[in-house]
Amino acid sequence: MGTPPDPSLALCARDVRKSFQIGGREIEVLHGAHLELKCGERLCLMGASGAGKSTFLHVLGLLEEPTEGEVWLQGKSAWTLSMADRAALRNRHIGFVFQAYYLLPDLSALENVVLPVRIAHSYGSVRFNKSRHEAEAAELLTKFGLGERLRHRPNQLSGGERQRVAVARALILGPEILIADEPTGNLDTGTGERVLDLILDEQRERALSLLLVTHDQRLSRRCDRTLIMEDGQIQADSTVVIPQ
Ligand SMILES: Nc1ncnc2c1ncn2[C@@H]1O[C@H](COP(=O)(O)OP(=O)(O)OP(=O)(O)O)[C@@H](O)[C@H]1O
Ligand SMILES: [Mg+2]
């Protein structure tokens, strides 16, 4: 295990490799990717389709195990922890927003947002209090313009509304890190802009460390730095600061 990274980093990935087994063949998708996300910064990750951005985000978000490499947060090398400890770390410190929302279809908007709190309760890190946590979730959803949609199921919501529920779910436990994989990718331009505004407003208010994957240049211009991923690696010279 390497040395712990500088504490000014919210997330640090070193030499991440990831292979998949396809039809008995091993295919390496990430070939030693590095990334440093500073506390409170907005970092954008771009790159061609198939470059490995989502795969990298899943490793960074502790959702998918790398074949090799380290991911550090909260002073811990997350992939050396037990599965339970890693899941608890992810649950409390990382919010994840997916392009395809991934809300649970049988739960209401409110229940989807409260779900991470119930999970945190099962890890023993939060004591679930139904009325208090439902009130917190309702407050967040109301702030996001969904006060009239609390009891709606995902299939009764528009794409933009679903993504706003997903952002609320990602933020309900007050994580320091928010990882978003093409959060506006399924939305039309206007709806996507509103979801993005909401994410960036929350980033500012909460001083979140934000890692955002996008294909949209306009979105990257609203971030502090942009990294480029090419063929499973972060380009060494890709710390582009795109002018405003
Ligand atoms: N579970 C998996 N099993 C096998 N191969 C996979 C798996 N997940 C991803 N891959 C492969 O890894 C490569 C990178 O995929 P990934 O989804 O990370 O790309 P991406 O940069 O996010 O692309 P996009 O911009 O289209 O979302 C692709 O060639 C893909 O086929
Ligand atoms: Mg992707």
Image (cartoon, rainbow, N blue to C red):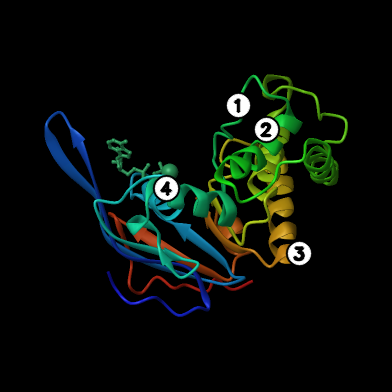
Q: Which mark is residue 205?
A: 3
Q: Badge 3 local density, few (<14 within 10 Å), some, or many (20+)? A: few
Q: Amino acid at mark 4?
A: His
Q: Which residue is mark 1?
A: 104
Query: Residue at 67% of width from left, 45% of height from top?
Result: 167
Which quadrant, please, contains the N terminus?
bottom left
Q: Earlier in the sequence, mark 2 or mark 1?
A: 1
Query: Residue at 73% of width from left, 34% of height from top?
Result: 161
Q: Which residue is mark 4?
A: 58
- Give the Cα distance between marks 2 and 1: 7 Å
> Mark 2 vs ligand 2: CB under 8 Å?
no
Query: Residue at 15% of width from left, 41% of height from top?
Result: 26
Tags 2 and 1 touching, CB below 8 Å: yes
Q: Position of residue 112 (x, y in %)?
A: 67, 32
SS at mark 3? helix
Q: Amino acid at mark 3?
A: Glu
Q: Amino acid at mark 1?
A: Leu
Q: Position of residue 147 (x, y in %)?
A: 87, 35
Q: Position of residue 102 (x, y in %)?
A: 56, 32
Q: Earlier in the sequence, mark 3 or mark 4?
A: 4
Q: Earlier in the sequence, mark 3 or mark 1?
A: 1
Q: Which residue is mark 2?
A: 112
SS at mark 4? helix
Residue mark closest to the camera, 4 vs 2: 2
Q: Amino acid at mark 2?
A: Asn
- Give the Cα distance between marks 1 and 4: 19 Å
Work out whether residue 148 or residue 191 is closer to the camera in this orientation and state it.
148
Side of 138 relative to 68 (left or right): right
Side of 176 relative to 147 (left or right): left
Q: Badge 1 local density, few (<14 within 10 Å), some, or many (20+)? A: some
Q: Residue 201 lies in what quarter of the image? A: bottom right
